[in-house]
Image (cartoon, helix red, strand yellow):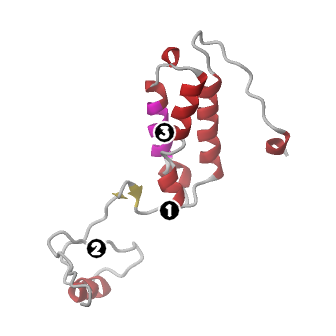
Amino acid sequence: MVSGQMINHEKSSICFSPNTEQHVIRDQVKLLLSIERETMNERYLGLPVLVGKARKRTFAYINQKIWCRVQGWQENLLSKAGKEILIKDVAQAIPMYAKSCFDISKGLCDELSMMIGRYWWSQQDKVHKIHWLSWEKLS
């Protein structure tokens, strides 16, 4: 009331946990908040609403998004510096929003690193250089 802001009931909807009792509690909450619509969106602001135990599958869209971006970059037109800038500014920036909100699995992070590493070390003539790992990473 102090801020003067009000809920727009036409745009609002509510999402309940599957564990919430069907009629009694859900109806009381909707009546209390004056929200009529009940919805179960998969995404909100580009992030998944529900994250269960299958985190790798839930965040697979990040992997696909980066892969599509990397495939669109034409290597023969880029220098090593150009590749580095694209990796730092685009490929590494895509998962940052999701990482700031959720604890993304180590396996997914490793897959993203491998994909970026593969792009970094690839050559125009399809000959790949060796991608060495540091001793810290191996231990």
Circle 1 sits in a helix, a strand or a loop, which is it? helix
**Quarter of the figure with residue 134:** top right
Residue, disc 1: 101
Q: How far apart are labels 2 and 3 at the CA level?
A: 34 Å
Looking at the image, residue 139 lies above or below residue 82: below
Which quarter of the image is occupied by the N terminus? bottom left
User: Which residues, given as a range, are shown in magenta?
Assistant: 60-69
Sequence-wise, which precedes: disc 1 or disc 3? Answer: 3
Membership of 61 in magenta stretch: yes
Foreground: 118 or 86?
A: 86
Foreground: 17 or 108?
A: 108
Sequence-wise, which precedes: disc 2 or disc 1? Answer: 2
Circle 3 sits in a helix, a strand or a loop, which is it? helix
Amino acid carrying mark 2 in the image: Ile
Looking at the image, residue 86 lies above or below residue 36: above
Observer-side mark, 2 or 3, equals 3
Residue, disc 3: 90
Q: How far apart are labels 1 and 3 at the CA level?
A: 19 Å
| Residue 20 horizontal side relative to residue 12, left or right | right
Residue, disc 2: 14
Residue reaching furthest left?
10
